[in-house]
Image (cartoon, rainbow, N blue to C red):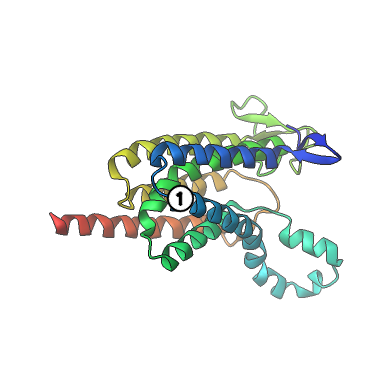
Amino acid sequence: MHPILFEVFGISIGSFGLFIILGAVAAWFVVRLLAGNEDKDIPLVFLLCICGGLIGVFLLRPITRIPEIIINWERFRHIPFRAFISLMFGEAVFYGGLIGGAVAMLLYCKAFKIPALPIADLFAPALAVAHGFGRIGCFLGGCCYGIHVSSSHVFAVVFPPVSAGAPPGVPLLATQLIEAVCLFIIAALLIIAYKKAAGTGLVVCAYGILYSVVRFILEFFRNDEIRGVYGVFSTSQYISIALFIVSVVLMWRILDKSKEKL
């Protein structure tokens, strides 16, 4: 569990960044495994989704903090500029990346009149795989940690002082690894589903339903202080609820249309 793994020419290579890269490579492998080399649009859309995702991961937190800044402006206005920028943009949020990548894909498909659901179906298992690698990076870096648990707990982990943010020396629930395992299981289920329902939109709907449920539940067991919490739920739980509803409605519409064609 070390946020910095090694240095190359004075540049620090972090575990989180390394596993994000490994996740992207693994995701591309899954895409090629499922799609082959027939669709020439896939590499470009994949790259655009990555670019959109990278923008989204750093924009979601500032957007969700706007109400907090307005309400507590007197406190925020005294924060030094660099500290304020770090506070606003210093955290990568997965749901922001998901939204950013989805927007990039939809804009491309709309511009070139390409059906979006077949591409979304193809990318859904790959996204789950990439996210699973990302959560392993979170674990190695010490972010996104869980609640305090007994040292005898089967999923307890003790982080060293060099971790990115987890309190050192105390047993915490390894929520990062739990989520990673769930994501790899979801990816396996989606790959199986893709072979039977590719291009229908049902695969991406299944991803939205499965992951939103997993994320909503796991949020109750996370304890990292920088998470945005509004009322009884965290920001990610509100997004999970929205993702679940959208996925269920879209799946219902797809299944309803398929019945009409019979």
Which amino acid type corresponds to the residue marked 1 in the rendered image?
Answer: Ile
Count of numbered circles on the image: 1
Determine the residue positioned at 63% across, 59% down.
55
Residue 48 vs residue 145, the one in the foreground: 48
Q: Quadrant of residue 11?
A: top right
Percent coordinates x, y for residue 119 in the rendering? 40, 52
Residue 70 vs residue 63, the one in the foreground: 63
Residue 180 vs residue 227, the one in the foreground: 180
Left or right: 8 in relation to 15? right
User: Which class describes the residues within 10 Å of circle 1: few (<14), some (14-19), or many (20+)?
Assistant: some
Percent coordinates x, y for residue 182 in the rendering? 49, 37
Determine the residue positioned at 28% across, 40% down.
196
**Quadrant of the drawing holding the N terminus:** top right
In this rendering, does residue 204 appear at all?
no
Percent coordinates x, y for residue 225 in the rendering? 70, 51
**Quadrant of the drawing holding the C terminus:** bottom left
Percent coordinates x, y for residue 30 in the rendering? 46, 38
Q: Secondary structure at mark 1?
A: helix
Judging by the rendered image, the residue that carries numbered circle 1 is 42
Determine the residue positioned at 44% across, 47% down.
124
Q: Quadrant of residue 218?
A: top right
